[in-house]
Amino acid sequence: MKRYHADALDQRSPALIATLLPVMEIINTHYLRLKTEGLEHLPKGPVLFVANHNGGIFGPDLLCTLPVLWRALGSDNPLFALTHDFAMRQFTPLGRLLQQIGAVSACRANANRILAAGGQVLVYPGGDLEAYRHSRRRNEIVILPRTGFIDVARANGVPIVPVVVQGAHRSAYIFTEGKAIAQFLCLRHWARLERFPIAIALPWGVALGPWLPYLPLPFPLRLRILPPVHIAPDADSLQAARQVQMLMQQALDEMAAL
């Protein structure tokens, strides 16, 4: 067996993706009742998809976003998803499986490699700050203060296409984000995490920590793809990130009001 490397880009399997796609679409259609809009905004060529993160480490936002992009772009399209490298590196069997559907360890170097080769990248810049936000903040986009995605898009001269999912954060009731717990455990140092959430979620009952996946509940989801955002070469990273977050928040507010 080939030696495992979390940064490998040659393990993506279009055949496996084509096999999984109909099954995932059945789940999205009949269980999550996904409604999608904005497919006309999908560009061709290298692009950075920037999405909001909901419902924990394997939230339903990811389960619906990837199939939508696979169907629209094709299973052969070189789409990769930046994934937190703790799971990729510490649980090798999971890492191998994730690689086959286009996952790669989340870092700027990998994003640059993919875009330079003509591929497309899906990133959740809010990461754990957004995925584990308190349930009362379920309709809030949390990207700032993270701005690395702006630097990647600007350095590679590619557009940012925001992808907003509404309803996915109801998969669990997160009643504490666990910022103090994460600081006490020094998670940022050894796991690159800033939150240690405590949630009420299936199948655990009480779910402790950032590594337990929550069983998605059958709440209806909406997904909206926004028009591409082009980053000027001289744009301020913080201001550009704030603009992207504002556009995504407007879309989320509109979908939540429906």
Image (tube, grey):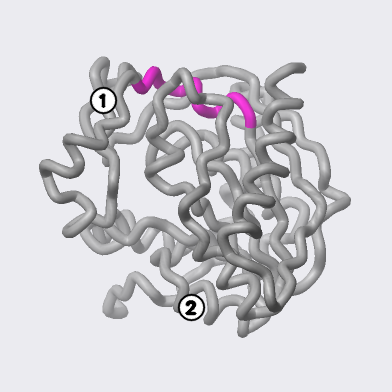
Report the Cα–Cα distance between label 2 and label 1.
36 Å
User: Residue 27, percent across and down?
Assistant: 60, 30
Q: The magenta stretch spans which residues? A: 166-174
Residue 52: x percent and y percent?
A: 57, 42
- The verdict on residue 242 being magenta is no
Q: Position of residue 11 (x, y in %)?
A: 46, 72
Q: Which mark is residue 198?
A: 1
Please check the rendered image and state whether residue 173 is part of the magenta-colored stretch, yes or no: yes
Q: Is mark 2 on a helix, strand or loop?
A: loop
Amino acid carrying label 2: it is: Asp
Q: What residue type is labelled 1?
A: Ile
Q: Where is residue 243 in the image (x, y as percent from the top left)?
A: 68, 51
Residue drawn at x 23%, y 34% as measured from the top left = 209
Q: Which residue lies under the disc numbered 2?
A: 10
Q: Nearer the viewer, mark 2 or mark 1?
A: 1
Could you tell me if residue 164 is visible in this image? yes
- Label 1: which secondary element: strand
Q: How crowded is mark 1: few (under 14 residues within 10 Å), some or many (20 or more)?
A: many
